[in-house]
Amino acid sequence: MRTMLNFLLGLHAIMLIGSLGSVVGSLLMFLQGSLYLFEAWHTLFEPGDIGGKQLTVPVLEAVDSFLFAIVLVIFAYGVAIGFVFTLPEGHGRRLPEWMKVAGVGQLKETLSEGVIVVLIVIFARTVVEAEGKFDLSMTVLPVSVLLIAGALRLIDLTGSKHGNGKVESRPGEDTLVTPAPARSQVKKP
C-alpha cells in the first residue's frame, strides 16, 4: 500500500510535460511574433506608398503572438512552481506575485484573461483589415469577449475565486495573507 502511495505521489512530476510544452509553445509564439515584426520592418522600407493597413496588421499580429507567449510563460511557471517543485524555506517571498500559484483556478483565470486580451487584439486586427467596411459578423468577437469577461466577473463575485484571503500553502513557502474580515467585523459607513 505504501509503495502504491509513493508511486502515485511521484506522478506529480509528469506535470512537467505540460510545463515544458508550454515553454516550447511560448518560444514558438515569440518566434512567430518576431517574424511578424520582421515582415513589418521590410514593409516599411519597401519602395512605394505604404498604407496603414500594410504596416499595422503585421504589428498587431506580432503583439497578439507576444501576448499569448507571455501567457504561456506564466502558465509554465505556474505549473512548475505551483505543483511540481517544492521551494526551499524562504524562497516563497522572493518570487514575484505572478509566479505564486494559489491553485488550478488561478491558472485557469490567467489563461482565460490571456484569451480575452488575444481576442481583443484579433478584433482590432479585423477592424484594421476591414478598412471601414462594417459587417455584422464582425460583432462576434466583441460579444464573445463581453460574455467571457462577464462570466469571469460572475465567478469573481460568487467568491469561488482563489482570492478570498485563503491561499493553499505548501511546505517551503512563506506566504503572508491576511484573512478577509468576517461580515460582522466590517464597519458600514
Image (cartoon, helix red, strand yellow):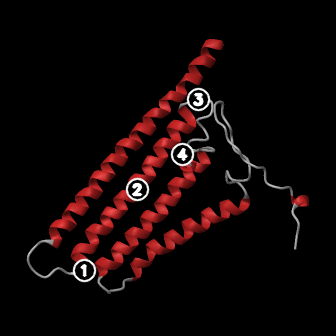
Q: CA distance from mark 3 to mark 4?
A: 15 Å
User: Are there few (<14), some (14-19), or many (20+) residues within 10 Å of tag 4?
Assistant: some
109, above or below 94, in the image = below
Q: Which residue is mark 3?
A: 88
The amino acid type found where label 4 is placed reads: Met
Check disc 1 and give the amino acid type.
Gly
* Real-space Cα separation, disc 3 to disc 2, in angstroms: 30 Å
- Quadrant in which residue 167 is drawn: top right
Please provide percent x and percent y for residue 82.
57, 38
Side (left or right) of 68 relative to 132: right
The residue carrying mark 4 is 99
- Residue type beneath disc 3: Pro
Identify the mark nearer the N-term, 3 or 2.
Answer: 2
Earlier-in-chain disc, 3 versus 4:
3
Residue mark closest to the camera, 4 vs 1: 4
Q: Which residue is mark 1?
A: 52
Q: Residues within 10 Å of mark 1 (few under 14, many from 20)?
A: few
* Residue 68 marker: 2
Instruction: Please name whichever residue, 181 or 16, is drawn nearer the observer in this view of the structure.
Output: 181
Type of the residue with mark 2: Phe
Query: Which one is earlier in the sequence, the residue at label 4 or at label 1?
Result: 1
Tell me if 14 is positioned left or right of 37 in this view: right
Q: Position of residue 177 (x, y in %)?
A: 72, 47
Callout 4: helix, strand or loop? helix
Circle 2 crowding by C-alpha within 10 Å: few under 14, some 14–19, many from 20: many
